[in-house]
Image (cartoon, grey):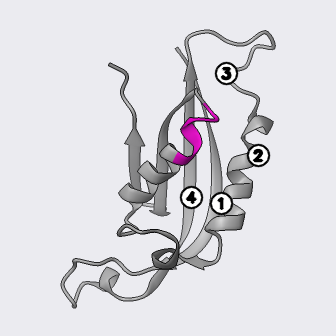
């Protein structure tokens, strides 16, 4: 199995619902998010790639146009946790990138949430 990944970044604010009022994430705050997409393939293509990294430029465009410098509660219909954002981005990109198997969302250098699809 061959695996590749590529990172993208954006800045945004959010408020997490369902937390006690004294929890810092229940208040308006922001992050410098790092999104990592993970792709895999059993075999390489005729060039020797899992996928040309330039073929992932649409991800950057989507992130820049939709998420960067936005308030995520205004964008999403769900509680914008890192876990939910990872699943959402996976669902957005999977149809166009069949090699995609996981999306990572980091809100800080020390925290990461991963949504990974498993084949049955």
Q: Mark 1 or mark 4, which is nearer the start of the sequence?
A: 4
Q: Dot 3 surroundings within 10 Å: few (below 14), some, or many (20 or more)?
A: many
Q: CA distance from mark 3 to mark 4?
A: 22 Å
The vertical placement of 49 against 24, above or below, is above
Could you tell whether 77 is left or right of 38 in the image?
left
Q: Depth check: give the residue in front, 71 or 42.
A: 71
Q: Which residues are magenta?
A: 92-97
> Which structural element holds mark 3?
loop
The vertical placement of 26 against 112, above or below, is below
Please report the residue visible at 73 percent of the width from the left and 19 percent of the height from the top: 49
Mark sitting on residue 50:
3
Please report the residue visible at 58 percent of the width from the left and 43 percent of the height from the top: 93
Q: Depth check: give the residue in front, 26 or 72.
A: 72
Position in image of residue 117 (x %, y %): 39, 33
Mark 2 highlights which residue?
57
Could you tell whether 5 is left or right of 103 in the image?
right
């Amino acid at each position: 199995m061959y695996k590749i990944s590529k990172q993208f970044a954006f800045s945004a604010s959010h408020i997490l619902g369902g937390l006690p009022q004294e929890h810092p994430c229940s208040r308006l705050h922001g992050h410098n998010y790092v999104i990592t997409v993970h792709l895999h393939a059993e075999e390489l293509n005729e060039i020797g790639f899992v996928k040309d990294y330039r073929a992932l430029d649409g991800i950057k465009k989507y992130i820049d146009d939709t998420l960067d410098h936005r308030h995520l509660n205004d964008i999403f219909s769900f509680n914008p946790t890192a876990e939910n954002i990872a699943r959402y981005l996976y669902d957005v990109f999977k149809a166009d990138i069949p090699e995609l198997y996981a999306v990572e969302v980091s809100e800080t250098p020390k925290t990461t949430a991963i949504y990974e699809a498993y084949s049955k």
